[in-house]
Image: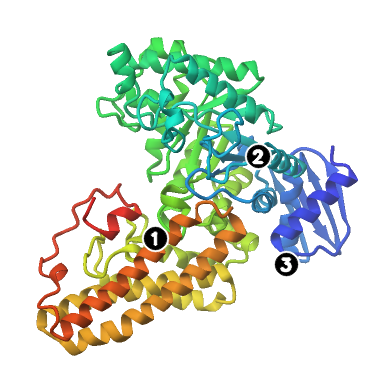
Amino acid sequence: MLDNGVIETVKTAVLEAIRQKITPDVTVNEGEGLRVSYKDGSAAITACDRAALARGFTLLAKGISDGETEFEIKQERHFANCGAYLDMSRGGVMRVEAVKRYVRQLAALGMNMLMLYTEETYDIPEYPYFGYLRGKYSKEEIREMSGYASSLGVELIPSIQTLAHLANFLQWMPSDHLKDTPYCLMIDDPQTYELIDRMIASVSSSYSTKLIHIGMDEAHGVGLARYFERHGLVDRFELLNRHLAKVVEICEKYGMKPIMWSDMFFRLGSKNNEYYDKDAHIPQSVIDSLPNVSLAYWDYYHTDEDMYEFMLTEHERMNRPVVFAGGIWTWSGFLPQVKLTSATMIPALRACARHGVPTVFATMWGDDGTETDYFLASNQLAIFSEFCWRGPDCSMEDIENIGAFLTGISVETYRAFGGFYEGAVDRRTGKGLIYCDLLYPLISEKSSLEERVRAYEDSRAVLAAQLDRDDVRYADLLFAIAAEKARLIPAIRQAYKTGDKPQLADVADNRIPALIELYRSLVNAHRGQWEGVFKRNGWEVFAHRYGGVIERLRDVAYAIEKYVKGELTALEELEEEPLPPARKLGMQFYNVYVSPQF
């Protein structure tokens, strides 16, 4: 029911999210889809539910803000459910007020679901090491967030893990008996199902939804470690399905409707353990024995619609409801991967629309410590919302304009964020430059460092128009540091090889100290951003990383000074000629940039 209380609650939340005021009176009616009209200073919204009403207020405010004096908008959902999926398990656990702020943004776009990915960052009293020191949510915090989301038409849904991705819990000795691999639970062990029972009891009593995502993705090696030692080799399809059946049974005990990641079925059917292997074979007997569970197909990588078409067709063959989880690339380091998100998600959502997929999610992962604040990626939520409400033919202009209206970050500024990366590919040179050693060039750049400097300075020239914003100043510092390190790395080597000690002295006395000051400014900016969004737990990772980078810069300056004075006969790190980057592109975490030592 869209009664006056609901209308006022939704309106207030949306106007706070978009930083706008609506002066005319607005007549609100309940009806199919979404209709927004404005003429002669009078406005009317017809909406099918609270999330649609919230979007209606956004579209009304945008039209008025754009100077339109008369307009009528008619829209229908092309996906029954369209939501976001936030990783709360890689260090960053969002504060309750930050989640509420995020819910307001989702509602303002007309999105109606939010999943919180909590591997073990929620409370299970019987297991004190579950989420220990990780900023886990209490039941009271989850209830508060869930109730608030419901008031705006957004369904808050738990996403947990019931098989793999539990290394942070399994690292503790009291959990050792539950372990198959360092990441996976021991299937068939009664104590495993006691734990899972407590997991599902906890979330079912905290969230108001009946939906639950039970994970079960990337269970590499399951059944091949301690399980193998106990039971020998078994049919791994049968093992996975047996475990799934028990987990689904527990979900049903608590009245929950499970969703699971689908990749392990495809991996087990692949000779190469690949999810996207077109030659993978899932036996019909496995499909026939699947319990009552929805299958979540996750894919953030492909730029051709044909691959999404193929995978959706293969999922439909499994005769279970299909959910699509795409990705807004927040896991590449410090800033969102703007170009790669657009290049992958536009074809994905077009394929989903053609297949009639009812539910789509925009996942935002925090791999390697949650380097990117999820709010920095809010502009790209509009890819999902506009495909939902405008259909598969919506334009990039539509997407970018409503993203800019939502966040206040201009289209040009947001595009400039994307300059941190080398186009629509997963290559993290910008992140590598933030972390890397000045003397060890452990970065996997495709373009030259000179080209990277030009790209970073081009982005900085665009960012200059919005430097009054904290988030843009933070981005500017990242570009400034990356550009200076890209200059310094070849300059130091060249000066050393040519014996240019005055140049080296300038590096040690001036350029490195100036770079350290930029880092100190970045630490302050990043910490302020973190504390406004996340609990303090997890920030210690960045304190250690930044501290290590700064101390190593001081150490490099120290060594150069000793070399210039003749107290060192050589800078041994520079004696070896650099070889081409030889680490796998998939290994683009902090540790691979700082040292060749393992």
How far apart are labels 1 and 3 at the CA level? 43 Å
Quadrant for the N terminus, please: top right
Residue sitting farthest toward the bottom: 502
Q: Residues within 10 Å of mark 2 (few under 14, many from 20)?
A: some
Q: Position of residue 532 (x, y in %)?
A: 61, 60
**Residue carrying label 2:** 138
Q: Amino acid at mark 3?
A: Ser
**Residue carrying label 1:** 545
At x 80%, y 53%, the residue is: 11
Q: Position of residue 224 (x, y in %)?
A: 29, 22
- Of the two numbered discs 1 and 2 on the same chain, state the one appearing first in sequence: 2
Q: Nearer the viewer, mark 1 or mark 3?
A: 1
Q: Is residue 555 visible?
A: yes
| Residue 202: quadrant of the picture | top right
How far apart are labels 1 and 2 at the CA level? 29 Å
Q: Residues within 10 Å of mark 1 (few under 14, many from 20)?
A: some
Q: Is disc 1 placed on a helix, strand or loop? A: helix
- Of the two numbered discs 3 and 2 on the same chain, state the one appearing first in sequence: 3
